Amino acid sequence: MTAMDERDTARAGGTAPAALEADDRRYVRELALQARAASRKLATLTRADKDRALEAMARALAAEADQILAANAEDVARARERGMSQALLDRLTLNPERVRQMSEGLLAVAALPDPIGETVSMSRRPNGLEIGRVRVPLGVVGMIYEARPNVTADAAGLCLKTGNAVLLRGSSDALNSNRAIASVLAAAARDAGIPDGALQLVDRPGHGAAGAMMEAVGLIDVLIPRGGRGLIERVVAEARVPVIETGVGNCHVFVDDSADLDEALAIVINAKTSRPSVCNAMETLLVHRNVAEAFLPRAAAALRERGVELRGCPEARRIVPDMAVATEQDWHEEYLDLILAVRVVPDLDAALEHIAAYGTRHSEAIVTRDYVRARRFLQEVDAAVVYVNASTRFTDGFEFGLGAEIGISTQKLHARGPMGLEALTSVKNVVYGSGQIRV
Amino acid sequence: MTAMDERDTARAGGTAPAALEADDRRYVRELALQARAASRKLATLTRADKDRALEAMARALAAEADQILAANAEDVARARERGMSQALLDRLTLNPERVRQMSEGLLAVAALPDPIGETVSMSRRPNGLEIGRVRVPLGVVGMIYEARPNVTADAAGLCLKTGNAVLLRGSSDALNSNRAIASVLAAAARDAGIPDGALQLVDRPGHGAAGAMMEAVGLIDVLIPRGGRGLIERVVAEARVPVIETGVGNCHVFVDDSADLDEALAIVINAKTSRPSVCNAMETLLVHRNVAEAFLPRAAAALRERGVELRGCPEARRIVPDMAVATEQDWHEEYLDLILAVRVVPDLDAALEHIAAYGTRHSEAIVTRDYVRARRFLQEVDAAVVYVNASTRFTDGFEFGLGAEIGISTQKLHARGPMGLEALTSVKNVVYGSGQIRV
């Protein structure tokens, strides 16, 4: 999940007949073998080769904008007929400005340094062996994502820059859009000397192809799902290929009794209301009992003024009487909406307990002026990003200075938090010898 | 798989009745919840706390050697009754020297620097936010391994040093040994102030408990299988918890026509015969056609003198006529024995093709004096470790200077090649603000 996704809804998967499944497996295997062959060549390209192709792809998107918009209009018309919600339609719909942004995104990726080939470390052993660790591509990346067609261009650009081949499996709702974008990009890449198979759309109806990608051990090196909770949980549960889990964000802000309450108010408003539909938005506000009387009425008024519905624990409701009741389920909820759960806690320990019990290890913040509590919060909260005195909304590849974002990892292996180009790389050990044998 | 494992054979898993499976799940869940509670405390221990415990554990192993040896003798007697092979019995059997080595291994881990808490990077953003990346434990590590009881002590030590709780699932053949070792270690750790639940043996008959560990998403952060190909493939195929795949090693040495043939001979003999049962041993020798006549007869004589059976391609058999025929299967085989497949290839490209087609991405070597070919081999071979002019046998945490080894990763995510303490850590993003909100 990236901060940009605004959560598409996952669909329930239907069971395809066995013959279709075998077909899907054959189809995905064929694509993946082409991708693997391409990836061996991609790994040896220079930065200049790759940037030239990215620039050509950016120009092609701009030049073919009309064709892409026409294809997108078909998707949108069909989706509207089927009664797609306005929120999802917004994500699906392209316009000239959005196509321009895709094109500029590719240019921005071209301008980033190339991580591939960097020697991360190099040391000489007592026997004279020189052992280096060199950054290399992952190989074949599988993207499984929902209705936003811009992911097709973003992922294609980031994977090409890092020398990876990519299999793009978007939502069937965006199929015409994705076909148009992928074919424009693939043609431009090919003309710029990128091997065939570097960038392929997984273009099959039904859910079988995504299932086949999840099983493709040895063919696909990593799967990155991007979308709503349902999609991500399905991929994590079913995939045998390694997955980078991108995250569900049940994020908290804890207002300590030593907080500057004006600062706390600004952070709370920003974390909840600046973009409520994204994964780094706050979902539960925790307030230290000693400042609850002073802080909660002000916060409630400011939040309600911005349309936020509040659901509180008994103590919060005593202080702000017209607040709805928060149930156990509310502490678990990632609303992605203008709704906020509110809980008064007796101390930092209770806040830490609450976050450990209900948090999704995404982004957690404390507002405090107390050195010891700031330090404890940073050390003891187990999350991808932990903040002191800042809004959780900063969890984002661009805000972190990565220059790009392929998603926000909430797992602990390989990459954690906002993922830029480096998350799409591995490290190879290279050993320079002069005839050494092991004794 | 570590270079130390000498491959236990995997057993076929039986299907337990549903009630037993539910029991296994409950049991593993209970252990994992205790482990998770312990891991929160372990994450905050200082190096001094952890080293003191490791030293106490080392002393306890030495003091309780008799008890451990008696328990091991029971396992060995039972295994012998059941007709276990001599090779497996060797791995299972402890003696005073091996117990001493386990104890010394814990002291060696205590002497290593503590990776936890290290600030990997820290930068200041234009808005004044300071964003750091700090090394933290993974949380709960699950080890699933075969007959070698020393893994129990090794894994317990490495996980404690890195602040992780560990669930140890050894082979049922070593159950008495593992019980004795784990209970001695857990008692010593507890007395030294380590929280209960930091180190637990998964002590259930049958395969259900291992299966329950593989499903324990959210409870176990990573699974590390150690053992034979069957075990590793089962865990990779079935686990929903992230896995670090430790590797099957179908390793190659390519002798180029520019090689110093004396150097090549020494490397080939070392890579095949110094310890044929380990994953970093050479399994296939590739020889450039231009030096095959000069090199193969010498190599064949030297290898046969050391008991190696050779299986060759037609061209190799023309040069060394009494060589057995290599079938397609031989190119795939990880013999782990004094058997070597031999193939004559026309050039570097053919060697690279062979390695890409049959290699398991573990360790690959070229012997050459040609700068361009050395560079191409390093760049184009996709493997955890790639060597120029050195034996593949160096793929090992100790030889790489890591001071320890939890296994050798052949996957590309998170860790690749020999894994020391750092592979058992994650990175947390910590953000120091002064009231920043996102505009």
Image (cartoon, coloured by chain):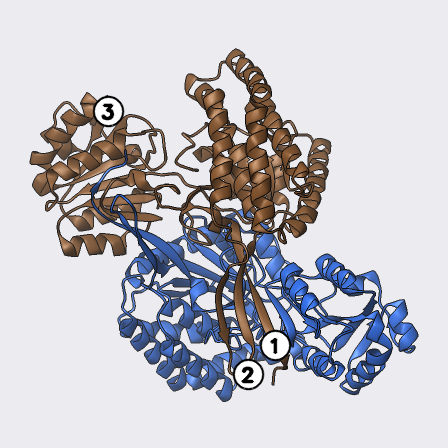
Chain colours: A blue, B brown
Q: Residue at x 42, y 30 (%)?
A: B7
* Residue farthest top in this picture: B81
Percent across and percent down for residue B127 are 55, 83
Query: Distance of mark 2 from mark 3, alpha carbons?
Result: 66 Å
The numbered disc on residue B433 is 1
Q: Say which quarter of the image contains residue B214.
A: top right
Percent across and percent down for residue A392 are 64, 73
Q: Which element is circle 3 on? A: loop
Residues tagged by mark 3 and mark 1 found on one chain of the structure: yes
- Residue B180 seen: yes
Q: Earlier in the sequence, mark 2 or mark 1?
A: 2
Percent across and percent down for residue B189 are 63, 38
Q: Which element is circle 1 on? A: strand
Q: Which residue bears the numbered disc 3? A: B308
Chain ID of residue with mark 1: B
Chain ID of residue with mark 2: B
Q: Which of A425 and A149 is in front in this view?
A: A425
Q: Residue at x 47, y 25 (%)?
A: B98
Residue B218 shown left or right of residue B135 in the figure: right
